[in-house]
């Protein structure tokens, strides 16, 4: 599954607000733990990290270990995604068309650059009039 980091501001109480970098799909768990209105996405001044491929089964295990259980004894990850990692996959990162287009474009200045050791296309002929 594809996962992307985002930064959120988690308000734990009136005096404590903590910015945290988490995977996009973890935001739903944070909202379940701290309340819908206490978790806000921060978009300004945050690095844009590329999405990464992760194993959904291993990620579900990590989430269960990281966030633990609520007072009822149920894991927060299970409460949000269900008992299977398949529920987690529904929250996988989906790249936008703009992001996909940016990825397929060559980086500025790198489109037609030859490696330093590449032979020249216009090599001199053997018949050239070189001074001997």
Image (cartoon, rainbow, N blue to C red):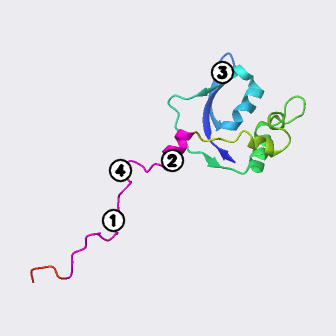
Residue 39's image quarter?
A: top right
Alpha-carbon span between mark 2 and mark 3? 38 Å
Residue furthest toward the top? 14
Question: Gap between marks 1 and 2, in whole Å?
Answer: 25 Å
Q: Which mark is residue 16?
A: 3
Q: Is residue 9 left or right of residue 55?
A: left
Q: Are marks 4 and 3 in contact (CB under 8 Å)?
A: no
Which residue is pictured at 51% across the width and 44% down the height? 101
> Mark 2: which secondary structure?
helix
| Residue occupied by mark 2 | 103
Where is 82 relative to 13, above or below?
A: below
At mark 1, the secondary structure is loop
Q: Per the image, is 100 magenta?
A: yes
Q: Sequence-wise, which precedes: disc 3 or disc 1?
A: 3
Q: Residue at x 72, y 39 (%)?
A: 91
**SS label for mark 3:** strand
Say which residue label 4 marks: 109
Residue pointed to by mark 1:
116
Which of marks 3 and 2 precedes in the sequence? 3
Q: Where's residue 26, x and y in %?
A: 71, 36
Q: For the residue labelled by badge 4, is the local secondary structure a helix, a strand or a loop?
A: loop
Q: Position of residue 75 (x, y in %)?
A: 84, 36
Q: Residues within 10 Å of mark 3 (few under 14, many from 20)?
A: few
Considering only order in the chain, which callout, 2 or 1, is on the residue closer to the N terminus?
2
Among the two numbered marks 4 and 2 on one chain, the one whose residue lies closer to the N terminus:
2
């Amino acid at each position: 599954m594809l996962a992307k980091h985002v930064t959120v501001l988690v308000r734990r109480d009136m005096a404590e607000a903590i910015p945290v970098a988490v995977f996009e799909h973890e935001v739903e768990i944070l909202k379940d733990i701290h309340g819908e209105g206490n978790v806000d996405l921060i978009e300004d001044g945050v690095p844009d990290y590329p999405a990464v491929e992760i194993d959904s089964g291993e990620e579900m295990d990590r989430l269960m270990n990281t966030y633990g259980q609520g007072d009822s004894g149920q894991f927060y990850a299970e409460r949000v995604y269900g008992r299977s990692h398949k529920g987690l996959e529904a929250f996988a990162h989906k790249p936008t068309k703009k992001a996909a287009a940016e990825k397929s474009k060559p980086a500025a200045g790198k489109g037609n650059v030859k490696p330093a050791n590449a032979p020249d296309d216009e090599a001199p002929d053997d018949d050239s009039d070189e001074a001997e």
